[in-house]
Image (cartoon, rainbow, N blue to C red):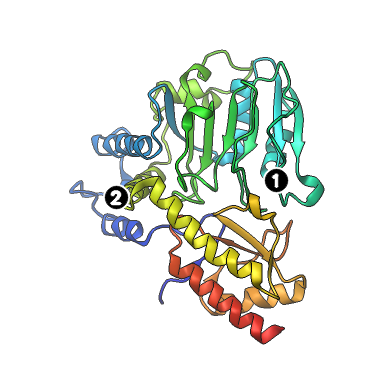
Amino acid sequence: MSRVYNFSAGPAVLPEEVLKEAAAEMLDYRGTGMSVMEMSHRSKAFEEIITTAEQDIRDLMNIPDNYRVLFLQGGASQQFAMIPMNLMKNRVADYIITGQWAKKAAKEAEKYGKVNRIASSEDKTFSYIPDCSDLPISEDADYVYICENNTIYGTKFKELPNTKGKTLVADVSSCFLSEPVDVTKYGLIYGGVQKNIGPAGVVIVIIREDLITEDVLPGTPTMLTYKTHADAKSLYNTPPAYGIYICGKVFKWLKAQGGLAAMKERNEKKAKVLYDYLDQSRLFKGTVVPKDRSLMNVPFVTGDADLDAKFVKEAKEAGLENLKGHRTVGGMRASIYNAMPYEGVVALVDFMKKFEEENL
């Protein structure tokens, strides 16, 4: 069977070259006579894998020397607790609520201190990003938290909030490595890799060194302390070794594509094909305010639940997989991450045109 166009929000499409390379090395990684899956994380071969992976993501994102890169487990959801445990010194934090994940993160942080929800777009089903140019930032806030790209609702911060000098913490799970980023604007950036970088099971945290301290909330487990992992170079315990290996291959692939500036250009080109069609379609419509649209996740609806279901079913038959929208929004969603080829988006739009003609 030939490969389908996979529009899943995560775990998501990976570059075919990476999968082929991993397949070729499955039984014998570079003459070791074993798979990376079977390899000690203390071995010379794996040490080289993780060291190279870190250097490559540093190169791609121009990560300054005073930031550490950590390869952790527990997904983005574990960071909802780890962040306040490590950073909430005054036990106060400001959260901007632009979707399901920011909402969950704020709720989790409330276990550790006072959470101020200083802006929200929940009034219009998270279909826009609130104005964050002059927010009521709390004087004693330890940090300001955002989810930069909202996978479920298809919105993206095009401008970072004005945090008035407070540390910015961002969940970038679904826009990770999709465009150039100025790391110095953040105190901590993190993301689960299963959307735009690798297989599920790895979360990458990029954290400024001054935020890594022993001064964490009482009762914080050793495993949930950033210092534990920073001191041990992500090898405090057995890391998700195979996942890190695949991430490393994706970093190499991104470099070969021309880096993040080239990816941004490609991603804009892909998204334009889909958004241009949605803007003139008589059947389908996008659900996000145009200026806040994500390049990665594109939700759309027909306005009729039965027709939406029919579309998802027929799209699947045509080799266009995982287009069903999140259960909280309904409709459809096309996730068009870095590894989704331009041809895949064109194939989707061609199918939508045909469906529109047949169902209007």
* Disc on the earlier residue, 1 or 2: 2
Location of residue 71 (image quadrant): top left
Q: Nearer the viewer, mark 1 or mark 2?
A: 1
Q: Nearer the viewer, residue 260 or 246?
A: 260
- Residue at the extreme right: 123
Q: Residue at x 70, y 75 (%)?
A: 283
Residue at x 71% of width, y 38% of height: 131
Q: Is residue 89 above or below residue 285?
A: above
Distance (Cα) linking label 1 and label 2: 40 Å
Using a 10 Å C-alpha cutoff, classify the residue at mark 2 as few (fewer than 14 neighbours), some (14 to 19) or many (20 or more).
some
Q: At numbered mark 1, what does the secondary structure look like: helix, strand or loop?
A: loop
Is the residue 298 above or below the residue 218 in the image?
Answer: below
**Which is more toward the observer, 51 or 143?**
143
Residues tagged 1 and 2 counted as in contact (Cβ below 8 A): no
User: Circle 1 sits on which residue?
Assistant: 99
Residue in front for this viewpoint, 78 or 285: 285
Residue 315 image point, x, y percent: 58, 76
**Disc 2, SS:** loop
Answer with the quarter of the image where residue 129 lies: top right
Q: Residue 89, percent across and down?
A: 64, 15
**Left or right: residue 47 compared with residue 230:** left
**Residue 172, percent from left and from top:** 55, 41
- Residue type at mark 2 is Ser
The residue wearing badge 2 is 35
Q: Picture quarter containing residue 93?
A: top right
Q: Amino acid at mark 1?
A: Gly
Task: Please identify the quadrant where the N terminus is shown.
Answer: bottom left
